[in-house]
Image: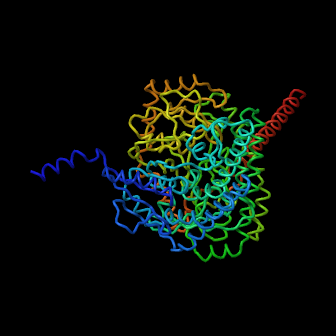
Amino acid sequence: WISAIMLLQVCYTGCGFCGRVLVWPCDMSHWLNLKTILEKLTERGHEVTVLVSPQSFIIDYSKASTMNFEVIPLPQNRQAAENSLNDFLNVATNVMPTLSRWQSAMKLHQFFIHITGHLKLQCESVVYNQSMMKKLQEANYNVMVIDPVLPCGELIAELLDIPFVYTLRFSMGYMLEKYCGKLPVPLSYVPVNMEALTDKMTFLERVKNVMFSIFFDFWIQQYYSQFWDQFYSDVLEYSHWINIKTILDELVQRGHEVTVLTSSSSILVGPSKSSPIKFEVYHAHLLKDDFEIFFQKLITQWIYNMPKDTFWAYFSQMQEAFWGYSHFIEKLCKNAVLNKKLMKKLQESKFDVMLADPVGPCGELIAELLKIPLVYSLRFSPGYAFEKYRGGLPFPPSYVPVIMSELSDQMTFMERVKNMIYVLYFDFWFQTFDEKRWDQFYSEVLGKPTTFSELMRKADLWLIRTYWDFEFPRPVLPHFEFVGGLHCKPAKPLPRVLWRFEGKKPDTLGPNTRLYDWIPQNDLLGHPKTKAFITHGGSNGIYEAISHGIPMVGIPLFADQPHNIAHMKAKGAAVRLDFHTMSSRDLLTALRTIINDPSYKENAMRLSRIHHDQPTKPLDRAVFWIEFVMRHKGAKHLRPASHDLSWVQYHSLDVIGFLLACVATAIFITTKCCLFCCQKFAKMRKKGKTE
């Protein structure tokens, strides 16, 4: 009876939901407060695991505890850690009180920079440790508790795809609370921490408070952007790289060895120790900042300035931007192909195939130098110029709309006129697109006369990242394979918390609207309760919506986005709004139209069925063709003979001219014969009358 009563008591006093908690702590007094919370969690039946450094001062992971400890594999250099701590305590207690506030703040700043190397090493020892990350992923934690004073916890939570909770006393200048947690800190009556002010401030004290707030804001933002932003990006990687990386990951899974050639100035692609993909990084004379400034300027110009201009001004500005981009790429290409040590290493590696994006020239030159087959992966080129003139893909302008024209395949006479003007403009643009400079450079490197276009035409295969659920029907060639949506995956169950919002919370936000810093977009689109998708029209998001059959409200900003939304609108799966002129009423009307008109959902589901009803998945098809090129040392049998013809020959202008000349000659001879006969007949009649 006693045992039964005790068992019954345990059953009724246990927690209603017992989960798994992962912890990223900070040492010293921070741990004392956090430990109290964790002990309470274990008392309620939760399983708590603490990621701890072997150099920790007061987190004793060797003692028996109700908590589990996962020790980070770091070198045991406890003496150096103690020396750093003692130096800091000495400066903080003996030196900083004798300095001015500014000097004290700078001392603190220097200390943070000094320990950043150790903090990064600790973070790398977790996120780049494949066995540890695999173990953490397999543990299926429900939440992560993090002390944000020690960076990295949020990165681990992101990699594990779990929600996280911060616990902290304060951050310098309340910077994390303000800019990450969106906590209002009115400087008129809220004193910045560490300044010994109260909420009753004089005018000069408020000035001092504002000055220190600005200082801490600048300091912390500089600290995170300088030391952590790129590191986090390297680990998580960029969305622009999602399609090509999806293919590469699949190739690696199938046993292929993949090496990515990237420059030291790349802002999109970089080495990652946790990735099975190898990275060959070559030194570039350009800086990352140069690229960031250029692309920020390009995007700002494209979104906010270009649409306001006339047609010719719009495209002339875009052309100027692309020429600037061309100069950047040319410098990087020279840094690669003129690097004898790098090229020798690549040649000795004996690669079987090269996968390149033709929007960034140079891949075709490297493939030619290494004497290996070339496969292109491409979404589009402006005006489809590369696809037409380098790939030989037919584009009849009578029913195939030029990309960026925002037309459909059902065009009126004036729309066909507009389409033809776009065709002629882009053709002229790309015929003069720095080709002489690229032709000269390629010829110098190869040591023989050649052209940029000639090398591009040698590509064995073109993988186009769209499919017929999105594209309008048009002629294709055998060496073009459409693999749109290769990154799409089935939706996973949604986490208990969703988040995606960056920036200041609007004052007019209604009580029925939630703002978050991050959202698992694919999983959210796959949820049965999702009714509509408000999107800027990027091809990745478009394909995720198509995959799950979700109608769209499109608000395109730049590049191919207006064209993508025009396609979805023509297929009856989207409503388009103008970013520069739309109002809240327009957005509400568009949403109601999408949700209440069943035709949009039906059309989206029809596209989804088309997308999924393929003999092979897009990713499998892309990988198959790359492996095909590797097995057969190329795919020249798929290459059309049009590549060997001149523009005159391709359009049969010489044949037409010859036939017209033959007809004209025949007509001329016939006419001359008739005239001669008529003259003879007339003379004979005249002679007869005379006689």
Query: Residue 220 at x, y = what percent?
Result: 65, 51
Q: Is residue 479 left or right of residue 682?
A: left
Give the quarter of the figure containing the C terminus: top right
Q: Residue at x 75, y 69 (%)?
A: 445
Residue 261 sits above or below residue 301 on the image = below
* Colouring mode (rainbow / by chain / secondary structure / one colour): rainbow
**Residue at the farthest right position:** 690
At x 63%, y 30%, the residue is 578
Q: Is residue 244 visible?
A: no
On the rendered structure, is 270 left or right of 16?
A: right
x and y percentages locating residue 284 in the rendered image: 72, 65
Can the viewer see residue 431 in this picture?
Answer: yes
**Image height check: is 202 above or below 458?**
above
Q: Which residue is painted at 57% across and 35% down in the image?
A: 565
Quarter of the rendering containing residue 509 = top right
In the displayed orientation, state which residue is furthest to the left. Answer: 1
User: x, y (%) of residue 577?
Assistant: 60, 29
Q: How many marks?
A: 0
| Viewer-closest of 300 and 155 | 155
Image location (x, y in percent) of residue 590: 53, 26
